[in-house]
Every structure is written in structure tokens, then in C-alpha cells.
Image (tube, helix red, strand yellow):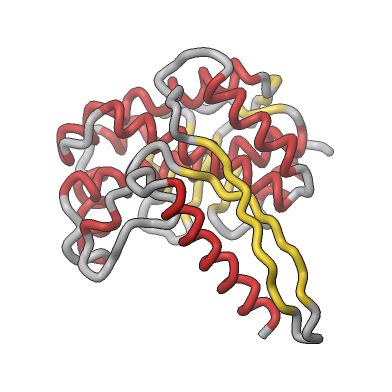
Amino acid sequence: MNKTDLVNSINQQQLFTLLIAPADVSWLSFETALQSNWIPNMMASFAQSYSGLDQRGQGAFFISKFSYLLASMLAHFDLQSGKIPTVTSKSLWIKSQTEPVTLLLENLTLDEATNGNLRATIIAFFEPFITPVYHYSKLSAAAQWRLIADSIAAAWLLVGRELNCEVMAKEKAMAILQQEKSPLTNRQTHYADVNIWHPEPKRQTINVTKTYRLRGGCCRAYTADAHQHCATCVLLTKDQQQQRLKRLLTNELTQTYT
């Protein structure tokens, strides 16, 4: 697959659009964005959308959103080509007012997507985020790295599922996180299978197993009004997670067959 076809394939997903073109004045590099009012403005938008979300929760939403964007882009490149683009906070640009997010690379230079290369790329990209996010939200560096690790695990799982290589994708994600000790390493981020029996419309009962990413960090969504802990929240016990995920999977299947 050539570079153009690869980017076109990646842009079939709905999370973001990736362009390869020169950046004009309408674009903002992530490095420049981090030195502007971009972070507090984004945090304010999360606070408006999730009434009551506390300050650290706003920081958690911010780091989760953009780490998941980057991880999803890298997972698509990795799982479709075995290569990843050279990405830094200087080389990746954003139009922050667009939804879904539009990203831009001025040049598409691809490197081998080894576990070490992926780990180093993600860490180097997010190191400039940690101090300003802490400054505006008081969310600790350790908490931010846990959320970034959660995004990596979720992105490779979901992209792998989309591309019919889920097992290999999960192995790749865990190797990035656990193969060598780094800021991304923690004991809690992992995968768990949820199994239920579910009736089909023809009154047959089928056995369904689905893999979920379980968190090592907390997004603090429970601090927002009328919200509670997520089904995958690190603050829940294993039994509570399983119970909530079984209900979630039951609801997903019910909607599928309705």
C-alpha cells in the first residue's frame, strides 16, 4: 500500500482526519498550542459539556482525548503497514476548532513500527504536555501517564478489532506498555474478557465474549453531575467491573438485534 492509499484508508475512520500538506496560518502546531491558551480553553469546554467536572477531571479529559487521538493514528499506521510516521509536538499540526479533529503532517516520513520506536515516539510527544496540564489542572504526572497508557491499550484494541487483527493488536499494545519500564508502565492497565449468554431474535441463545480495556488511570468522569464511575474504572473492584461490563455488553447486543 502506497502512502496516499494508506492515509486514505486511515481517514475512513470517524475520529479524526489526517492531511499531508504544507501548514498555513490556520494551523497550530502542538508545540505552539501548548504555549498558548489552548489547554485552559479546552478544559473550559469540557467543564461546560460535563457540568460539575472537577479541575483534575478537566485535565484528565484533555490528556485522554489527545493521547487517544495520537494512539489511534499510530495504531492505524502500525497495524496496516508496520510503519509509523515521524511525529513530534513540532511536526504535528491541528485545527483545534474543528470536530472531528483535523490533523496535519507536512511530510510523511515512515519508520519501522517496533515496540521501542512506538514507545519512544509516544513518550517524546507527550512529555511537553505533562507540566502545562499539571499547571492548569493539578493532575499529577503519574496520573497523566496512566491515562496515556490507557489510551494506547484502547486504541490498539479497537483499531485491531476494526482490522480483524485484535489478538495481535493487543499483544502489541501490551508490549509497548510493559516490555520495558517507562512512564507508561503500570500494573493496572490491561485487557479482560467478558462472557455472556444472550438470546437472538430467533429465540436461540448465543455465547458472546468481548474484550475490554480496563483502566490504570481515572478519567474522573464521576465528579461530573449525573455521572458515575465508568464500567472500566480503576476505582472499581474486579467484580464491579465485570458486572457493569456484562450489562454494557448485554445492552450493546440488545441494540444490535433490535
Residue at 66 percent across and 29 percent down: it is 172
Q: Could you say where residue 221 lies in the image, as x and y percent from the top left?
A: 29, 56
Q: Observer-nearest residue: 19 or 64?
A: 64
Q: Observer-nearest residue: 124 or 59?
A: 59
Q: Observer-nearest residue: 24 or 34?
A: 34
**Relative to 52, is 208 on the left or the right?**
right
Kindly indicate the quadrant of the structure image that contains residue 191: top right
Is residue 24 at all visible to an observer of this figure? no
Is residue 238 at all visible to an observer of this figure? yes
Residue at 15 percent across and 33 percent down: it is 135
Residue at 49 percent across and 51 percent down: it is 102
Q: Is residue 187 above or below residue 246?
A: above
- Name the quadrant of the C terminus: bottom right
> How many numbered discs, if any?
0
Q: Is residue 258 above or below residue 168?
A: below
Q: Could you say where residue 113 lies in the image, as x and y percent from the top left?
A: 68, 23
- Name the quadrant of the N terminus: top right
Q: Is residue 249 above or below residue 161?
A: below
Q: Observer-nearest residue: 227 or 239?
A: 239
Q: Could you say where residue 186 lies in the image, as x and y percent from the top left?
A: 43, 26
**Relative to 152, is 112 on the left or the right?**
right
Residue at the limit of the structure toward the front, as seen here: 239
**Relative to 37, is 129 on the left or the right?**
right
**Relative to 99, is 166 on the left or the right?**
right
Residue at 75 percent across and 85 percent down: it is 201
Q: Is residue 71 above or below residue 249?
A: above
